[in-house]
Image (spheres, rainbow, N blue to C red):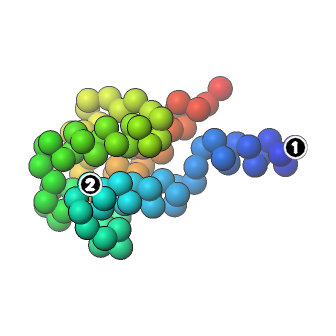
Amino acid sequence: MSTNIQTARRIIPQRAEVLRDVQEIVAEHLGMQMERVRESDALIEDLGCDSLDIVEISMELEEHFDISIPDEFDEQMRTIGHVTDGVLRLVQASRSP
């Protein structure tokens, strides 16, 4: 029984893991240190992303998490926290039986 739980945890990452990966992807894309990317940071206002950055970050997230991000997701990506929650929902949906 515990093996199934461990397997499930590997399949669906914890929110903290998704947050760390999102921070790393955004930081790398923007050429900044990961520690400077906070959960509360707004992509446009705080981090200076433009629409092309958001599309490219979405593509990197799709590849990293093996998910498909719908177009409307880009419009909802306000903060790093919003991105994290959205990615986690998509990962959960894509890996649920």
Image coordinates of residue 82 in percent, x first then y, are 34, 51
Please state if 59 lies on the left or on the right of 3 as rendered.
Answer: left
- For image coordinates 87% across by 43% down, the residue present is 1
- For image coordinates 66% across by 47% down, the residue present is 10
- For image coordinates 47% across by 41% down, the residue present is 65
The disc labelled 2 sits on which kind of residue?
Answer: His
Q: Residue furthest top?
A: 97
Identify the image quadrant of residue 57.
top left
The disc labelled 1 sits on which kind of residue?
Answer: Met
Disc 2 packing (10 Å; few <14; some 14–19; many ≥20): some
Please state if 55 lies on the left or on the right of 84 as rendered.
Answer: left
Q: Is residue 42 visible from the viewing direction of this image?
A: no
**Distance between the alpha carbons at the discs numbered 1 and 2:** 40 Å
Which disc, if any, is residue 29?
A: 2
Above or below: residue 20 compared with residue 74: below
Which disc, if any, is residue 52?
A: none
Above or below: residue 40 compared with residue 76: below
Query: Closer to the observer: label 1 or label 2?
Result: 2
Which disc, if any, is residue 1?
A: 1
Disc 1 packing (10 Å; few <14; some 14–19; many ≥20): few
Please state if 78 lies on the left or on the right of 63 as rendered.
Answer: left
Image coordinates of residue 89 in percent, x first then y, are 47, 40
Badge 1 element: loop
Please state if 84 lies on the left or on the right of 78 as rendered.
Answer: right
Identify the image quadrant of residue 43.
bottom left
**Is tag 1's residue or tag 2's residue first in the polypeptide sequence?**
1
